[in-house]
Image (cartoon, rainbow, N blue to C red):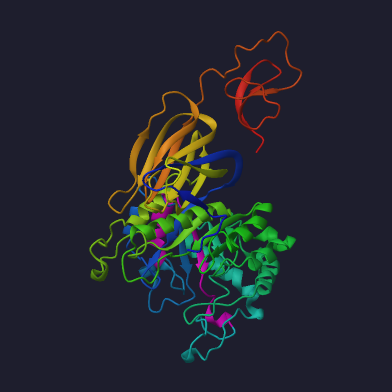
């Protein structure tokens, strides 16, 4: 993974003869709200799970130890061949049944499901096939949507939505295209940013949002989250009104590059930003080691820092994914239909960050001990979130040095829990954090080569902290105090509001 200074801090860490403390200051400045995390309902060269719902059972919903809540599926351009309505549960000329059982179960477990076309039907395209055209056997003819078929595209998406509805699945969103900037030999379709703009601006009104319960439209999903695709949509008022979610992949482009650039404009217009496909250790000949799992954790963290509101991994089931395949080549450790370490890494975010709002953080390091000790370089990443009464701090250390982590919080907290993953056989270990009285500064251990989730409960005392203040004269306007009852010149964050009628309440202000 390419590292950038905005993604992490390069920190000087003392040797074992010394001690080092990292200080993380969590501010009360709010950023994006996180919709969730997910994966694609396929494995092995994109084969859908069909009637095999085991991966979904293992990964989705509150009852799962992982807690995924977004599922991606292909809107296939291929015909179903000799399959009949009795085979697939509802009549359609297209091969759409494969994702239905998984989507049904995911919806029952509260997930969002969305569909992505790898290509429109072949007879809509310039090369007459659903294939991208990048092979000798396909004549190396680049496949794009024919201009005279733009008006057919959204009605075709409506037929998919109608099929899924008849199969008992309410689809939450549909995308324009998988990787419109990648010329492939498998199913694919090329769009320039200008062609996508024309399609959305002039024809997206044909997506039947009323019939399909407000289904949302996702932009095309470029290979490296090229912001030209989303920026062109967002800078056009008509197109901007049609698109709901800006999406892309991060192959070859780390999150704090193109993704962050695209997110900046998207958030200005109130759009969600989803990273809809990546496999950070694809095509490897071994099970990911713990260092590679920590790099995956860094990727998740950096997507959040970049402004992402949804993160969707590639396959659910693969030796480099979340559920084991059983392939002997990758055993031991790849037992079929068992959760793999990467799933538990994902759970740190999926279980706890979903539904939260990210808070900005600042970090620094202080060395204590032998001033002549030899220093080494390390990388530390962090992010923080608020969700209801919880303050959540993520911390990742990829080095061999155990550190102390001092966390300065924007509000007093009264209790805490540390979820720790340090190796493949020590995942999501839960340890209580001792807090004897409400505090805003806490020092906790940061073990070597670890992924950590620290969850703190905000102290909301029975007394609002200002009940004993003199009240000889009713204020002419609302006044504000911190949680210790000290008056504030500017209301910001979690504070006490004293109203003109003499009553008071806790409120969030100034975000």
Q: Choose between 81 and 274: the one closer to the eye.
A: 274
In the image, residue 421 above or below residue 198: above
| Position of residue 69 measured from the top left corner of the image (x, y, whole percent) | 45, 52
Residue 409 lies in the magenta stretch = no
Q: Choose between 369 and 54: the one closer to the eye.
A: 369
Q: Residue at x 28, y 60 (%)?
A: 337
Q: Residue 228 falls in which quadrant of the image? A: bottom right
| Magenta span | 98-125
| Position of residue 419 measured from the top left corner of the image (x, y, whole percent) | 37, 42
Residue 122 lies in the magenta stretch = yes
Q: Is residue 169 something one can see in this rendering?
A: no
Q: Is residue 22 something one can see in this rendering?
A: yes
Quadrant of image for the C terminus: top right
Which residue is outermost to the top?
A: 472
| Position of residue 59 measured from the top left corner of the image (x, y, whole percent) | 37, 53
Q: Choose between 19 and 242: the one closer to the eye.
A: 19
Q: Residue at x 35, y 59 (%)?
A: 322
In the image, residue 191 above or below residue 444: below
| Position of residue 375 measured from the top left corner of the image (x, y, whole percent) | 44, 51
**Could you tell whether 382 is left or right of 67 in the image?**
right
In the image, residue 485 above or below residue 206: above
**Could you tell whether 357 is left or right of 338 in the image?**
right
């Amino acid at each position: 993974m390419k590292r950038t200074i905005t993604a992490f801090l390069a920190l000087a860490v003392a040797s074992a003869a010394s001690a080092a403390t990292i200080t993380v200051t969590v501010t009360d400045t709010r950023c994006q709200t996180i919709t969730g995390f997910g994966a694609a309902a396929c494995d092995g060269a994109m084969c859908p799970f069909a009637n095999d719902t085991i991966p979904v059972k293992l990964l989705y919903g509150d009852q799962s130890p992982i807690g995924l809540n977004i599922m991606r599926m292909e809107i296939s351009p291929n015909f179903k061949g000799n399959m009949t309505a009795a085979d697939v549960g509802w009549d359609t000329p297209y091969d759409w049944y494969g994702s239905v059982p998984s989507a049904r179960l995911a919806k029952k477990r509260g997930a969002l499901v969305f569909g992505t076309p790898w290509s429109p039907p072949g007879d809509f395209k310039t090369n007459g096939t659903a294939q991208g055209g990048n092979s000798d056997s396909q004549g190396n003819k680049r496949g794009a949507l024919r201009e005279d078929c733009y008006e057919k595209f959204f009605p075709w998406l409506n037929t998919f939505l109608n099929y899924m509805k008849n199969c008992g699945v309410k689809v939450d969103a549909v995308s324009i295209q998988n990787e419109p900037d990648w010329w492939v030999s498998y199913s694919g379709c090329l769009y320039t940013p200008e062609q996508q703009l024309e399609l959305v601006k002039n024809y997206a009104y044909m997506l039947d949002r009323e019939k399909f319960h407000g289904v949302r439209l996702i932009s095309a999903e470029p290979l490296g989250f090229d912001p030209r695709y989303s920026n062109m949509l967002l800078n056009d008022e008509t197109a901007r009104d049609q698109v709901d979610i800006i999406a892309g992949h991060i192959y070859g482009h780390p999150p704090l590059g193109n993704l962050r650039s695209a997110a900046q404009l998207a958030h200005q217009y109130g759009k969600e930003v989803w990273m809809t496909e990546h496999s950070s250790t694809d095509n490897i000949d071994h099970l990911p080691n713990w260092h590679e799992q920590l790099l995956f954790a860094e990727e998740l963290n950096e997507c959040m820092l970049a402004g992402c509101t949804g993160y969707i991994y590639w396959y659910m089931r693969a030796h480099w994914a979340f559920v084991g395949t059983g392939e002997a080549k990758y055993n031991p450790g790849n037992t079929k239909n068992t959760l793999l370490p990467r799933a538990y890494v994902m759970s740190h975010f999926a279980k706890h960050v979903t539904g939260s709002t990210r808070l900005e953080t600042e970090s620094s390091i202080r060395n204590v001990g032998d001033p002549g000790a030899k220093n080494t370089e390390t990388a530390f990443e962090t992010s923080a979130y608020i969700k209801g009464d919880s303050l959540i701090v993520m911390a990742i250390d990829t080095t061999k040095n155990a550190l102390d982590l001092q966390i300065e919080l924007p509000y007093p907290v009264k209790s805490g829990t540390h979820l720790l993953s340090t190796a493949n056989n020590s995942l999501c270990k839960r340890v209580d954090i001792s807090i004897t009285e409400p505090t805003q500064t806490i020092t906790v251990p940061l073990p070597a080569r670890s992924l950590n989730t620290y969850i703190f409960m905000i102290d909301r005392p029975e007394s609002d902290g200002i009940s004993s203040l003199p009240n000889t004269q009713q204020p002419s306007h609302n006044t504000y105090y911190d949680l210790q009852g000290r008056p504030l010149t500017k209301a910001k964050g979690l504070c006490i509001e004293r109203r003109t009628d003499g009553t008071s309440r806790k409120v969030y202000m100034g975000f």
